[in-house]
Amino acid sequence: MKIDNLEKIIQDAIQSIYPGISKIPDVLLVPSPEGFGDFSTTVSFDLARILHKSPFSIAEEISKHLNFPYFASISVAKPGYLNFFFAPFVYRDFLQELEEKGEKYFYKERRGIKVQIEFVSANPTGPLHVGNGRGGIIGDVLGNLLKVEGFDVIKEYYVNDAGSKMNLFAKSIAYYYMKKLGKKAEPVEEAYRGAYIEDIATEILNDYGDSLLNEESHPLIDKIQEIGKEKMMCRIKDSLEKFGVAFDSWFYESSLYFSGEVGRVTEIFKKSGYTYEKDNALWFQSTLFGDDKDRVLVRGTEEPTYTLVDAVYHKNKWDRGFRKVIDVWGADHFGHITPMKALIQGMGLPKDFLGIVIYQIVHLFEDGKEVMMSKHSGTFVTLEELINEVGRDAARFFFLLKSSDTHLNFDIDLAKRESIDNPVYYVQYTYARLKSILIKGKERGIQYRGINKADLSLLGSSNEKALLNHFMYLEKEIENVARKYSVHRIPFITIELCKRINTFYQNYNILSSERYVQSRLSLVYNALNVLSFLMDLMGIEKKEGM
RNA sequence: GCGCCUAUAGCUCAGUAGGAUAGAGCAACGGAUUUCUAAUCCGUCGGUCGCAGGUUCAAAUCCUGCUAGGCGCGCCA
């Protein structure tokens, strides 16, 4: 028995009470404030508008006619709330299904829709920094969540390996490479300055010696760019693995040139009628789709712009069969949203094909002062440094805990301090505690015999009911999170669940609670199912002991 | 100048398909431990939900106008 079913039952009942109404408003059951009931609804307020009667009298009418077995009691509270206490068998049905399915309980039926989620996608011109960590966790967990919601999800990293930044990156390395070989080297303007540049130059020198010099100067840069890119990608992949973010696919921008797709899509745009030539460049009329200015697709130099190549990439996603793609971008890419959506439509793809999640900038503070982060200057804290400092789980939780709409002030000192009392340990501790009950029970010969052997009517205390209601409502909360892509809610939901579990734990010695033991073990057993689901969703390690 | 994000307890933040007394953690203070993990639990203290109007039976949530901070507005990526 799910909340959805009960909502439907109430809605149908209202329809039969008021057959004159063509469309009964949706009935939403939400957990009641303490004591009023298990769940409540405000549907009488919506009906009041339609029926021109007071919500209170409507609620009374409904409560009188709703004599279904599902409800142990129904009460009306001013000015028109309907409060329900559920019958024990409702919980039994629910727990039975949860117990049988375990974590799978929360997984929706497969929809047969391919969804791609693209995130991190940092240029391979430097290591991942803490900002990339934020995008990484949002994308990773959102991907997990959409799998739960029944989509076939692919997590993809778009490697921007074809633009001018890559060339600059190669030149920056080449400078050190030449210098170390005692050759004359002109300092590169606007060069990348992080220590990793020199490290990579040294590595290349160790691997290849001076053999790269034997060619003309231009091929040298190309060669270094190729080697440098691979070395950088290795580091990036390594960091992501330590962060627990696994991509299904790595898509290289350069492949779009090799395949000829850039040329083909340019033709599509030309034929679309939305382009024109001006100042030797090819322009796209994105103003027709709400943009505030038109965008250049092909430069006067005949090189495609980033804008065009990104359009090509998204066309490629469509051609691979994805019917929904979600891009997770930092706020500095905000200005790219409108042009990108315009391009999607310009290519004749559906408007809602592309969804975009923007996360706000991460500001870094150290000793109370803001640290200006930039790959160019080389002053930034890498994701890897953070993970080494606070640990993988704490780092993931730290990022996940803030709404993507909020600016994240990352205080390094605070992060180190918080690593000690990070709520992630509270969650892991709760999990280990529950596990421990089952283990200790087994040692003492008290084993959980399953929901059918448990008398749920014994679970009458407020914190036991609170747990049950929380289990039941979780499915709705997860749906809401998925609908709004608000993955930061998941840790909050988890912490709240853990709080209820710990209160329950503290109130009873479960293993020595005599005739209550089986019914209470059913809560323990299913709490583990639920907690396990949430921790897997967030990619947090489940430890049996702490 | 235009567009978007943010403003909620001392601090860090939840809470917007309008709903009952606005929540959590940390900090401060006071309690609970012969126990299945005290990395826990219970309680106290703490808020003109940035400001001013408006809509509504009902506004942190919706509308309008302000204020402050951030980000974006390239033939960069």
Image (cartoon, grey):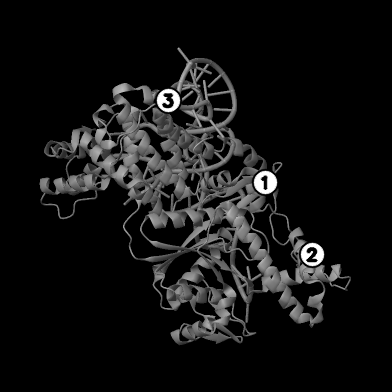
Q: How many C-alpha atoms fall within 10 Å of the one at disc 3: few (<14), some, or many (≥20)?
A: few
**At 50% across and 85% down in the image, what residue appears?**
A264
Q: Is residue A79 visible?
A: no
Q: How many C-alpha atoms fall within 10 Å of the one at disc 1: few (<14), some, or many (≥20)?
A: some
Mark in the foreground, 1 or 3 = 3
| Up/down of A36 relative to A263, above or below | above
Q: Which mark is residue A152?
A: none
Q: Which mark is residue A365?
A: 1
- SS for dot 1: strand
Q: Position of residue A530 (x, y in %)?
A: 38, 42
- SS for dot 3: helix
Amino acid beneath label 2: Thr
Q: Quadrant of residue A198?
A: bottom right
Q: Quadrant of residue A170?
A: bottom right
How far apart are the two marked residues, 3 and 2, measured between alpha carbons?
A: 58 Å
In this figure, what is the number of numbered marks?
A: 3
Q: Are marks 1 and 3 in contact (CB under 8 Å)?
A: no
Q: Left of A78 or right of it: where is A197?
A: right
Q: Nearer the viewer, residue A255 or B19?
A: A255
Residue that numbered label 2 is attached to: A202
The answer to whether tags 3 and 2 share a subunit is yes
**At 54% across and 35% down in the image, what residue appears?**
A546
Amino acid beneath label 1: Phe
**At 41% across and 70% down in the image, what residue appears?**
A322
Q: Nearer the viewer, residue A229 or A131?
A: A229
**At 79% across and 83% down in the image, what residue appears?**
A216
Residue that numbered label 3 is attached to: A506
